[in-house]
Image (tube, rainbow, N blue to C red):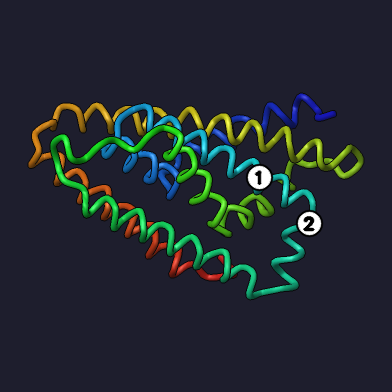
Amino acid sequence: MIDPLVLLAFVPAALALNLTPGADMMFCLGQGLRSGPRAAVAASAGISMGSFVHVTLAALGLGAALAAVPWLFDAIRWVGVAYLLWLAVQAFRSRGGAEAPAVPARRAFRAGFFVNLTNPKVILFVLAFIPQFVDPARPVLAQFLIFGAVLGLGGFVVNSLVGVFASGAGRRLASPVAQTWLGRISGAIFAALALRLALLERAA
């Protein structure tokens, strides 16, 4: 279904992109700092699932819909901004000690999925990157899904490792005061991601 040489060229290109610091990586870092390794890995899984949805939608023609209905891009973007700001407020309001429970893995997964899904830049990236490796003479949807799975798996591994590393730093700073500051750092990360998404241009 995919030329092995094309797949061999795609894997290192996808890995290089996964290793590039971006919004997904920073989100997992913030989850790891705030709630530990399980939440970080769950958030990374949610992000990868969101990316896979973007790949599927791109293959089915959402890119054409975004071009035909410009306000759809902004609607998706502002939903994402609002959600990230809500996460930032929750992190800023957290306090160290027993009254600041870790985010459950299921909730971290949903957060990662929703944050990725409401970032329209992801689908624009997918539309710019994956078609370079797609052979129009072969089934296009299947190729998109395979490339998307490779991209999502690499992102899951990289972002999970970043989140687990951050959670280790969080455990070493286990005092209530330190945990309060870690909450503030996580809140600042979420707020910065919201600002980055708010300033995103449609042509980006």
Residue hosting label 1: 53
Sequence-first tag of 2 and 1: 1
* Amino acid type, callout 2: Gly
Q: Is residue 197 above or below residue 87?
A: below
Q: Residue at x 19, y 28 (%)?
A: 171
Residue hosting label 2: 61
What is the CA distance from the residue labelled 2 to the residue labelled 1? 12 Å
Relative horizontal placement of residue 79, taking residue 92 as reference (left or right): right
Q: How many marks?
A: 2
| Secondary structure state at the residue bearing disc 1 | helix
Q: Residue furthest right?
A: 137
- CB contact under 8 Å: marks 2 and 1: no
* Amino acid type, callout 1: Val
- Residue 190, position in %: x, y? 34, 54
User: What crowding class fits label 2: few (fewer than 14 Cα within 10 Å), some (14-19), or many (20 or more)?
Assistant: few
* Image quadrant assignment for residue 159: top left
Q: Quadrant of the C terminus?
A: bottom right
Q: Is residue 9 above or below residue 130?
A: above
Relative horizontal placement of residue 126, taking residue 160 as reference (left or right): right
Q: Quadrant of the N terminus?
A: top right
Q: Which mark is residue 121?
A: none
Q: Is residue 203 above or below residue 154?
A: below
Tag nearer the camera, 2 or 1: 1
Q: Nearer the viewer, residue 85 or 144?
A: 85
Q: Residue at x 48, y 60 (%)?
A: 80
Relative horizontal placement of residue 4, taking residue 43 as reference (left or right): right
Q: Residue at x 60, y 35 (%)?
A: 151
* Image quadrant assignment for residue 74: bottom right
